[in-house]
Each structure stands twice: as structure tokens, then as C-alpha cells.
Image: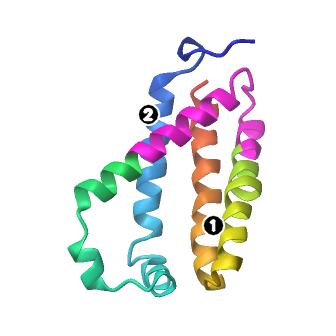
Amino acid sequence: MVLTLDSINLWAVLLAALSSFMVGGIWYSPLLFQQTWMEGCGLTELDLKNSDPRLTFGVALLMSLLASLFMAFVLVGNTSLLSAGLYGFGVGTFFVSSALGISYIFEQRPLKLFLVNGGYHILQFTLISVVLGLMS
């Protein structure tokens, strides 16, 4: 089977990416894990203020679009919402978080940082897949 852009719902990809992007904004905000994340990364409020938000958020949105597009291709022909959610959970857990875990153990990064970042990516890919599953 050859997969083309015709085989996916681009509106679903866009909505999935925007959903993922917005959840990331909440996840890494002061409401949830900003302080833990900053401590784990060694960042300060000044570091955040000195960063270019257009570049940071622009690249984050682009990466969310690419992740959503990839998941749309993975889920082609898989219309069950439960199945889509499980695929996303699996990608977030067994691909992304495990890859982060390997890097973090060698880099001697804090466990809390792994839990914050890994947890976000599990949620991110699950959400992307559920949105795609709902709109297929």
C-alpha cells in the first residue's frame, strides 16, 4: 500500500498538532511542571526571558505538525478510537520516552526531568492519536 497525503485528513493533522501544542503549553507552565522542568534543565527565569519566543514556539508547533502527520500515516485504515489511542500511547511510551530514558541515564539527568518530559510525550502522542482517531 502506498501512502499519500490524499489518504489522510489534513484538518485532523492540524487539529491534532494544535491540541498537542496547547497541552505542552499547559504541561510546562507554572500551573503544572515548569519549576520542576526548569530545575532539571538548569534553566532560570532569566534564561526563559532571554529566549526568542517566536523561534521556540514556532519550532515547537512545526515539530507538533510533523509528529501529527507521522501519526496520521501510522493510523491510516485504523479507525477504532481505542486502537488509535493505544498506538499513540505506545509510541509515546515505547519509542519516545524510552529513547529519552537512554539519553538521560547516560547524561546523568534527573529522574524528575525524565518523568516530566517523558510524561508529556506519552500524553502528546496519545492525544494526537485520539484526535486523529476521532476525525477519521
Residue 93, image quadrant: bottom right
Q: Position of residue 120 (x, y in %)?
A: 57, 63
User: Magenta includes 63?
Assistant: yes
- The dot on residue 14 is 2
Q: Which residues are magenta?
A: 62-87
Residue 78, image quadrant: top right
Image vertical order of residue 89 relative to residue 114, above or below: above
The image quadrant where one finds the C terminus is top right
Q: Position of residue 34 (x, y in %)?
A: 43, 78
Query: Rounded to the nearest whole Å, what is the CA distance between mark 2 and mark 1?
Result: 22 Å
Label 2 or label 1, whichever comes before in sequence order: 2
User: Residue at 60% of width from left, 58% of height from top?
Assistant: 121
Question: In terms of depth relative to the viewer, which is nearer, 23 or 90?
Answer: 90
Q: Give the amino acid type for the residue marked by disc 2 in the picture.
A: Leu
Main SS, magenta region, reads helix
Residue that mark 1 sits on: 119
